[in-house]
Image (cartoon, rainbow, N blue to C red):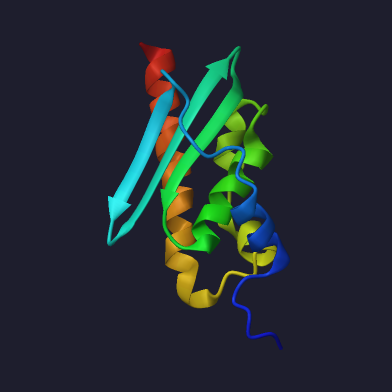
Amino acid sequence: MSADPYNSEVRRFFSETPHAGDVSGGAIAYFDDQGMRIRLSARVVNGALAELRFRAWACPHVIAAAESFCQQFEGRPVGELEQFETGQIMKDLAVPVEKTGRILVLEDTVRSLRAAISDRIAT
């Protein structure tokens, strides 16, 4: 057993974050509580997530999870956001059980992003 709390996937996503930043003029979802902040922004073109970006002030697991989310969903139809679940990310990133709540915050922020996109489309 390794003493390193971060597996190679966490290290890769944490060190390579091409989706870090903001989408100018896009839909935004934001969480700020208990010293953790996650901001997701998206630009939608023809019903697809043309561009996804994140900002995260959190532990490496959360930052890696946010990058993983953006990589997985960018280019996909907006409706597929409903399929986002944290279970696979928890496995892939070997997130310790005690950090489950932090990763679930990402799931809630994704749901908020979906709602923000729906609000933009409706107006």
Q: Residue furthest front?
A: 15
Q: Who's the residue at 58% across and 69% down the image?
A: 95
Instruction: Residue 7: give x, y in percent of width and height.
Output: 68, 69
Residue found at x 52% / y 34%: 53
Position of residue 16 measured from the top left corner of the image (x, y, whole percent): 65, 48
Observer-nearest residue: 51 or 118?
51
Left or right for 66, reference 31: right
Residue furthest to the bottom in view is 1
Q: Give above or below for 61 relative to 27.
A: below
Residue 28 relative to residue 78: left or right: left
For the C terminus, the quadrant is top left
Q: Name the quadrant containing residue 96.
A: bottom right
| Residue 63 point in image, percent of width and height | 52, 54
Residue 47 left/right relative to 8: left
Residue occupying the point 54% across, 19% down:
44
- Identify whether 40 is placed above or below 104: above
Is 36 above or below relative to 25?
below
The answer to which quarter of the image holds residue 109 is: top left
Image spot of residue 112 (x, y percent): 40, 38
The residue at the point 67 percent across, 41 percent down is: 72
Q: Is residue 23 left or right of residue 70?
A: left
